[in-house]
Image (cartoon, rainbow, N blue to C red):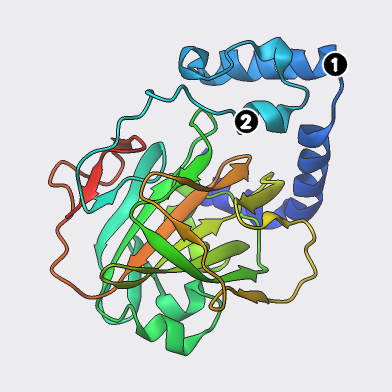
């Protein structure tokens, strides 16, 4: 199937209904049926259960429990870097933000303001800054960790579409990551504010953070905004900050600075939680 055909079919799919159904099945506790679904998933995507804290697929009560499984404590060593990779996955794109434009794929860009849900003041903090977009495939570990220390300031749930976020769709759907449903997490770090965005996708039943729990559902269809400025919620580099219940993409924004990305990084290349991302 060509990229054009694959993308066109997504415009026609009942993505919201598929996602609701997928979330229902993934959260259900169906005994041997759940175990068989997990077994087939592990075989289909060659999931490495040896590195899971609990490698016994029969012990997971629901598919979501399996999908958000913890890893062995030493499975992902943390590099000595200012910024570490927060997930297992693949590099979609990374680099400089040109004015307010974030590069998505050849012929496609989107604005920082669109990504963060329309907040012009927040977006302005990342004018000519830096970004990194990382894609999590079905076989990957789906907990998200902190790339650096941060004090939580805000969380914004932005309603949107639920296109797939695989590389084919990124090449074909304009403004994909600022178009899909997303959860924008705003932190204050040693070098100023930074943002980590969890981007939803088709069949992604929900997204969760460690300080809030499940963010979606519900899906009320309006922007929801939580302020934590009067609280002290601080997470250290490498700590878990959230998770996908079925996989998707994270986009990070950093302010203008002499930041230097890992020279071995290339679009399309694999990455692992804890490896050096930038200094």
Considering the numbered disc 1 on the image, is that residue within a helix, a strand or a loop?
loop
Q: Quadrant of residue 235?
A: bottom left
Identity of the residue drawn at 48% across and 16% down = 48
Name the residue tied to disc 2. Answer: 67
Identity of the residue drawn at 50% across and 32% down = 141
Front-lying residue, 161 or 61 = 61
Q: Quadrant of residue 126?
A: bottom left
Name the residue tied to disc 1. Answer: 31
Apparent side of residue 62 relative to residue 115 in the rendered image (left or right)? right
In percent of width and height, residue 269 lies at 28, 38
Please, which residue is most extreme toward the bottom here? 121
In percent of width and height, residue 249 lies at 49, 50
In percent of width and height, residue 188 lies at 39, 71
The earlier-in-sequence mark between 2 and 1 is 1
Q: Are marks 2 and 1 in contact (CB under 8 Å)?
A: no
In percent of width and height, residue 215 lies at 69, 58
């Amino acid at each position: 199937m060509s990229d054009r055909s694959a993308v066109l079919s997504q415009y026609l799919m009942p993505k919201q209904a598929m996602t609701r159904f997928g979330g229902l099945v993934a959260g259900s506790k169906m005994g041997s049926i759940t175990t068989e679904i997990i077994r087939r998933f592990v075989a289909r995507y060659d999931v490495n259960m040896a590195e899971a804290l609990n490698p016994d697929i029969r012990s997971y009560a629901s598919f979501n429990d399996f999908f958000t499984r913890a890893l062995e404590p030493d499975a992902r060593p943390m590099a000595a870097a200012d910024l570490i990779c927060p997930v297992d996955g693949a590099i979609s794109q990374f680099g400089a933000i040109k004015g307010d434009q974030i590069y998505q794929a050849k012929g496609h860009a989107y604005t920082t303001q669109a990504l963060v849900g329309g907040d012009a003041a927040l977006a302005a903090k990342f004018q000519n800054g830096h970004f990194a977009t990382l894609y999590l495939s079905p076989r990957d570990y789906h907990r998200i960790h902190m790339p650096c220390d941060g004090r939580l300031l805000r969380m914004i749930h932005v309603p949107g579409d639920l296109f797939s976020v695989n590389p084919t769709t990124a090449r074909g759907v304009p403004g994909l990551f600022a178009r899909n449903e997303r959860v924008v997490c705003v932190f204050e770090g040693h070098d100023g504010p930074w943002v980590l965005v969890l981007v939803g996708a088709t069949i992604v039943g929900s997204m969760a953070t460690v300080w809030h729990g499940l963010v979606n559902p519900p899906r009320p269809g309006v922007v929801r905004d939580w302020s934590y400025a009067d609280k002290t919620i601080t997470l250290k580099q490498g700590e878990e900050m959230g998770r996908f219940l079925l996989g998707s993409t994270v986009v990070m924004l950093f302010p203008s600075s002499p930041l230097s990305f890992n020279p071995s990084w290339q679009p399309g290349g694999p990455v692992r939680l804890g490896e050096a991302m930038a200094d």
